[in-house]
Every structure is written in structure tokens, then in C-alpha cells.
Amino acid sequence: MWGLLDSLLQPILDLATQLLEPLLERLATVGLSEPVVQFMLMNAILGVSIYLTLNCGMFSLANAGFMAIGAYVGAILTTQHGATLGEALLYGMLVAGIIAIPVGLPVLRLRNIYLAIATIGFGEIVRLIILHFDTLAVEFRDSKIFGPIARPILKLMVEDVDARRLEITLGARGITRIPVYTETAHLVVFLLVLSYFLYRLHHSRMGRAMAAIRQDERVAASQGINVVYYKNVAFVMGAMLAGAAGVFNALATRTIEPKAYGFDKAVDILAYAVLGGLGNWLGPILGGLTLTAIPELLRELREYSGVVTGVILLLIIVYLPGGLTSLMIPSFWRNGGRYEFAKRVTTAGVVLVGLVNVLPYQIDNGRILGYEFWGLIIGNMVIVGLLLWVRYTRQRQNGGHFSLPLMGVGITGVVLFIALALVGKIDHLAVGYYVHLIGMALVGLGGWISYPAEER
Amino acid sequence: MLAIQNLEVRYGAIIALRGISFAVEQGQVVTLIGANGAGKSTTLNTISGLVKARMGSIQFQGQAINTWGADRIAQHGLIQVPEGRQIIATMTVQENLEMGAYPRAGGWLGWRGESSDNIQADIEDVFQRFPRLRERRRQKAGSLSGGEQQMLALGRALVAQPKLMMLDEPSMGLAPVLVNEVFAIIKDLKAEGKTILLVEQNARKALDVADYAYVLERGQIAKSAPAFDLRDDAEVIEAYLG
Amino acid sequence: MEILHFLGLENANIPAQLMNAIWLGSLYSLFALGYAIVFSVLGILNLSHSAIFMWGAYFGLAASCGTSVYDGKCVELNHALWTAIPAAIIGGGILAVVIDRIAFYPLRKRNAPRLSQLISSIGVAIILVNLAQLRFTAERKGFPIADVPNTPINVPNGLDIEQPLDVARLALALVFQESGVSISPIQILVIIVAILLMVGLSYVVARTRLGKAMRTVAFNARVGNLLGINTELIYMIAFFISGALAGSAGILFALARNPAVDPFMGDSLALKGLTVIVLGGLGSIRGAVVGGFLIALIEVYINTATKYGYLDQAFVFMLFFFILLVRPQGILGQPIEDRA
């Protein structure tokens, strides 16, 4: 059976590998090497895994936990039993899915914030259990009550069950020397199959039921939709996908450690979905690809990848709640009109200037115009405060068509900075300097965009 | 005292008010009647500042208040008694009444506020008016009956020393006996010379107490006349009093 | 003695461990109070609370050590040690207000779903932790050891009755002398500051006009608005108090566990604080205090009486998980409707 499937899949994978080769070469030239591309694809799968639950109106942050389960199952199977990628994938997804059932049944009765924090708790418990698994395994093996149950299970994971110390997950050190089986072609094929599945799901009865549940659970229930069933199905499917991503991840990196699957990973997964947008299934895939690529493309930002994730999460949720995919919908651009557009431009400018000022080292080796620490902080606060003030007063008072104060501040900022560079006050024209200039220019531009009075 | 000009309100694409104009004079009881969804509550909420108008002006004692926040409007003596009473269930009756006088007491810091003796005297007046509240002053407001809650809501508004009171469906969800009681209270307030803007579904009762009435239909004023005349208007009788 | 044996405490120094639980509990309560106050007034779970906690510690460190914190270790104090505490309190408060304006205000104005606010607070938390890492490096920093009065008090020798601190030492020593309790002056400070802040806060919430306004807004912001309450101002104050509590918890933790200041010092507390307020009932002020002491007690018990000390975190989270499933309103909270 397994051999048959293998012989069917192999030609497809070979073809995919051939087709991908030139594309990968091209991507490598802009800084996206093959391992990076693999990560992008894995994160796209993870984005879909959280999308499945969000699409059903459930805010679950448990996916990092399921990813960890998949990763450890995959790693143990390949290192202890010499499993292939296909087997590891199958069992990884199965184990994650099976664990998801008893977790989901009680947890999914919770809603909103309660569900979110319960799943955060679940993720932490998984991480801590994996971290202490070896010690726990010995405890259980030696216990009179649990021993008979634990032994056969442990036998699956380690050869010598009776050893004094068991080495299964290896605590904080993690499992090392995992064979590298994951190829880019595997991920691409998996993602394509997944996309087809999602496309079909959307147009199926189940997809419509899930959308109804997201809209309003009570209404959905009153229309005869089995809410509990569909929620659990979505949760289990999400867990299985996260498990699959975990297996791919383990078999691509050689080493896995519990630290990598903690709360931070859960937040990253959430960020993929939020960035891409939850309007349709393309969003999380796009989000996973983009957010992984951004720090690699902007090499200067690599150090700041954490900040970038945070800022993107914040900006998207505040200013673009529909995510990147909402930009592709024409009505998005028609809504709001020119006033909203002017406001967005100004905001982008203020955010850029603010960011540069929070990280002043980037402008001129830690000094702006020779000011030290406290002067710097106060100076920055004044600049950003002034911009915010102008922006908000304009919003409130200026019923008019374009904002003179904003233009004034923007143009003054641009002129001042260019002048400072010309006079030689700034020794080192770092990236921050240019970002600052662009930010100021955007502020000025926001003031310059005119809009009819009644648009307010 | 209150003058509304050409007020237009939208919720997204839905137009709730299509340019209505009306006025309330000092000492008058004016009522807005109309069917569900005609825009009665929206009108009150726009005057209170909870909803922002897209166009039009609201003048209160000669000042344009349409750009003000709801808190500032309340501080200037335009007090709304919201639909469904909305008393603070987690606080005692006494505390609820004290919260009514929040702006008078000078906000959270108490700067330039009136003395608490003054306020307590007004609270005593409310107890005079509604003796049942005095018995329950230490009880949580959530434990009161519907009628008592309505009295508490009215009392809370009175403690604020309103220049203009806006009552949103004060009889909603009350037993007929209590409805009569509420309207008796409104009549009393009118006799004391209070200015009241009353929104009611119970058009017959509203027209009984009011001096002047406006009929709202689909966000527009369909009719306006002294309340006495509308009581005999054939169309109104058919549509609202029937 | 039977019961002690059953609990596995026959060898434990109970007064000492109890003292341990009390000071740890004060810290947890202080931290969780900030969580709870924002949740009760705005219904927001501010997951950046732990980042404010961490920045509070840095504010304190910078205030008494000066700019040397920036690049390296704090070698000597530029200002008195006590300046760290007000700096942390005020800095934390202002930081929380800024967070509100940036991450929550726009969403509130748009009437966005509660979950968006959870997400944006996660974004803020990531930004703050990473900024701290960029600014101060990931290295663990602390106050110069000699300047922090951290030596445990055991027996009263050479006490000066004129000194207030020594009077406290004497009292403690008399009470705990027999049992061999050791507690440092900083731990006493933690307990005193925590109790002062908790009592002060419950007085403010229960008795003052500000507290009543906060309760009104917590009950229904629209009604508060109609009563003439400037709701935005109340939100700002609530955030300031919340941030001040987080900042004070941060600096007290930094002093008591000196050296303890690093960008990740808030991470473990983030979820523990969540456990505390869930245990006490989300949004309940009293619940946060009770929950804080309970969690500390459980932790200390697991660490001293069982051999599963390494699992104390896991036990806390299991408890958290269990409570959410069985009684999501917590032990002191009111029933909630967020459950199907």
C-alpha cells in the first residue's frame, strides 16, 4: 500500500523539483535561500492551521503546541525507528489530531478571551511536558499504577525501556541529528493539495456551516447546524495541519528543542493569519510567506525581526483589519474616500518617524545633533508628540481641504534634515536617516492631499 | 432652549435620520412619537452626543453642541434617561443617585464642585418623591423591581439638576399600573416647570402629557402640531392610537 | 503531625516557607491587580502587562544607575537606590497610557471586536520585549550588590533601636527567631509596598468618586458617558494605575532577586499573572489579591513538599486550565456569559 502511494507520488515530486529549480535560483539571488523558502512554506501551512479555527469563530492559540507534538513525533520516529518522511508525516498528523480531540471537546465550550487564554495554557503545558518528558517517563514507568500503561507506549519511543535514565526528548537540549528528509518540492505539493482542499471546503456544506458559526453561533445552532461538531472538526483539522508543519520542520532543521514551540511561536502563527487577512483562505498563506520573507529581504532589519513582527501585528490590526488580502478587494479602495487616504498616508509618516526615533542609534551612532541619552529621549518625544498633535487637531478642527500645519511640519522636517546633512552635522547617513526623511515627506504629503469637506 | 436644524445621521450605508428639525422651548414637554425604527432613539442619542451627526446643527441655550462629547453635554444640563433604565446594577441605590450628581460634584477630583451637603439634600428630595427608594437605599440597584428601577433612573437624572430632561421610552416593559405611575410623575415634573423631551411608543399617554408633538416616520418628521390637536388627528389616530 | 506527614511537610520549615509564599504572593498580587483593573474597567486583557513589568524594572535601574545601564552593567549608583521605585511606578504608568493610546484607543473608537485588542496587545508586548533587548542587550543586569540591603535577617545582634529598619528587624527576629526564618529587608519592603498599594487601591475603588466613576464605566461605558463621566479620562487613569502597579512589581522583583533585570523577566509572569486573575475571577480586584497569594502558596508547596519541584510551572498551568474549564468565572467572580 505504502509502496504504491510512494510510486504514485514520486513522479509528481520529481516534476515539482525540476520546475522549482530555476525559481529557487532566482529567489536565492535576492536573499531567499532554499532553507528560507522552506520556512516560508511551513509557515504558510501554519497560517492555514490557525485560519481553520479562526474561520469558525474560535480564537485558539494552541497550534504551536500541536506543532511541537508533530515535530517530536516526527523526530522520534525517524531517529528511533528509521521512518520515512511519509510515515513520519502520517503519524505526526494522527497523533496531533488524536490529542486534539480530548483537548477540544471541553475547551471549545469556552469563547472569546477565555478560549484564547485556555489555549495559551495548553501550549505552555505541552512545552513543559516535552521539556521534562524524560524525567516524567521514568516516574510513570516506575509507578505501580501507571507502569503497565506507560511501558508499551514508551516502548514505541525508545529501545531499552528499562534503562536507568530514559533519553527521549532530551529536555532543553532537544533532539539532535534528525535526518533531513524535507524537500522544497514536498512542501510545495503539500501546500497545493491543501489549497485545493481549502478551495473545495469553502464551497462545501461544511465550509458554509463554519462561516455561519463564525457569524453568529446561536443563529447557526437555531438553523440546525451542529455547532459543537463543526467546531471540533475545525479544531482537529487545524491541529493536524500544525502537526504536519511540525514534522516538516523537524525533518528540515536537524535539531529541535521545546523552546522553539513556546508562546512566541504561537504569536508568530497568529501574526501570519492576521497579516494575510482572515477574509479568505489565501490570506494566511500569503501572510506566512510574507512575514517570513520580510526580515530576510531587508537585511538591515534582520536584527529587528521581533520588532517588525510586533509592529506589523499592531499596524495591521489597527489600520488594516482585513489584512493584506483586503487590499486586493476593490471596494476597500473605494471606501473611506480621499480623507481616509490622506489620514493613512499621514499615519504611515508619523509611524516611520516615530520608529526611527525609538531606535535613534540608527540615525547617527547614538546621537542626534550631539544630544545624549535624556536629551535624545525628550527630543524624540517632542517630535513625535508634535506630529501626533498636528494630526489629531487636523482631524478634529480642520473641516477643510488640505492641512497647512501638516504640510508645514513635513516640509520643515525634510528641509531641516537635508540641511543638517549638507552642513555636515550628521556624520553617518544610516538607514534611519532616509527612513526619517521618507516619514517626514509622507507627513507633508498627507497634508497636501485634498479632500472635499463633506467627506469628514 | 433646544433647537435642532436639518439633522442627518447615518449608520454606515443606512440612513437613520433624513434631515429633521424641531425645537423645545423652556418649560415645555415635547414628545416624539413614531413606530419602531423611525429614528426616535437615534434622535435622542445624537442630541446626547453618543451618535455623531453627519450634517445639521444642534443648539442648546444658544451654543452649538454637535461637536461635543456626551460627557460634556451632560455636564451642561442636558440629561438623558436612557431606554431600558440602565441603572448601575452593581451599585447601591444611594451610590446610583450620587453618580447622577457626578458633574455637579466636580468630576473625579472634585475640583470646583458643589458641597456634598447640597447634593445630599437633592438626594433627600428624590427620596421624598419616591419613598420606596429611601427604604432600599443600601440595596444593590440590580435587586429593585422594574418600576423602582425606572424611579431610580428618573431620580438619578433629577439629582443632576437637568435643564432639559430627555426620557427614552420610560414606560417600556412596565405593567399598566406602573405605566400610569410613570406618566403621573412626568405630569408632576411638568407642573414644576421642568423642560422635557419625551420619546414614547405609547402615543396616547405621551400626547396626554405633552404640549407639543412631532411624529417621526422613517427618519423624517411627518407631522408636527400641539399635542392637543394631534389627539384628534384622523391619521395619527389610525396609525398610532388605533 | 499526621496531616503534616500526609502533606509531605514533616521536614519543611513551615514558617519560613510561609514567609516565602507571602512575599512571593504580594508580588504576584501586585502584578495581577494591574491586569485585573484594566480588564474590569475596559474588558481588555492587556497581554503587554508583563512587558510593562519588565520596563518598570529598567526604568528603576536607569533612574538610580544612570546611563551606564545602557551599554554595560551598573557598577555604582548615580542616585539613591530609592529613586528606582518612584521611577518605575511613574514610568510604568506613563508607558501603559501610551500603549492605550497606540494599541487600544483606535480599536475602541472603531468598535472593533475584543479579540483585536488581544492581538494588538500581543503586538505591543513583542515590540517592547524586543526593544528592551536591542537597547539593553539580553544580558541580565542588576543593582550593585553592595548597595542592596539583601542580607537575610536571622538573629538580632547589634540592632540599633533608633533605626526604623532595625526596629522592624527586631520585631521580625522576635517573632521568627525560634523557627529560623530568614527574610531580607527588600522582601519586607515588597510586602509593605504591596500591602500599601493594595489597601490604597481598594480604598480608591470602593470609596472615592474616582472609584465609583470607574465602576460605572466598567458596568456600562455609555451610561457613564450619559452621566457626564469623561470615559476616555477614566480609561487613561485605569491604564496609568495598571502600569504603575506593573512597574512597581517589576522594580520590587528586580530588587528582591537582584540581579534579575533582563528583557525576558516578565515572560514567566505573564502567564502566571493570567492564572492568578483567572483563579480569582477575571476583573475582580479582590480575586486578584486572593489568587496571587494562592498561586504563590501552591508554588512554594510544590517546591518544598513534593519531588516534582521542576514541574511547578506545569502544575500552575494545569490548575489554570482546569479552572477555566470548570469554573471560568473564578473563585470570587460572578457568572459569565462567554460560555456556550
Image: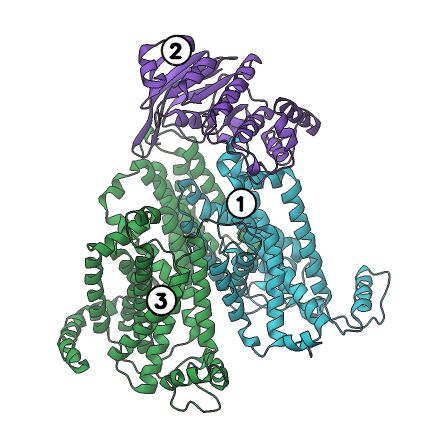
Front-most of residues A180 and A390? A180
Name the quadrant of the N terminus of chain C: bottom right
Q: Confirm or deny contact between disc 3 and disc 2 (CB under 8 A).
A: no
Residue B51 at x, y percent in the picture: 42, 31
Front-most of residues C50 and B217? B217
Read off the residue under disc 2. Answer: B231
* Label 1 secondary element: helix
Type of amino acid under label 1: Val
The lab-note entry on whether marks 3 and 2 share a chain reads no
Q: How many marks?
A: 3
Q: Chain of mark 3?
A: A
Type of amino acid under label 2: Arg
* Residue at (70, 72) in percent of width and height: C14
Residue C61 to residue A245: above or below: above
Left or right? Give the position of A214 relative to B168. left
Mark-to-mark CA distance, 1 and 3: 36 Å
* Residue at (15, 71) in percent of width and height: A19
Q: Colour of chain A?
A: green
Chain in cyan, by letter, is: C
Read off the residue under disc 1. Answer: C41
Mark-to-mark CA distance, 2 and 1: 47 Å
Read off the residue under disc 3. Answer: A101
Residue C198 to residue B133: above or below: below
Q: Colour of chain B?
A: purple
Residue C15 to residue A255: above or below: above
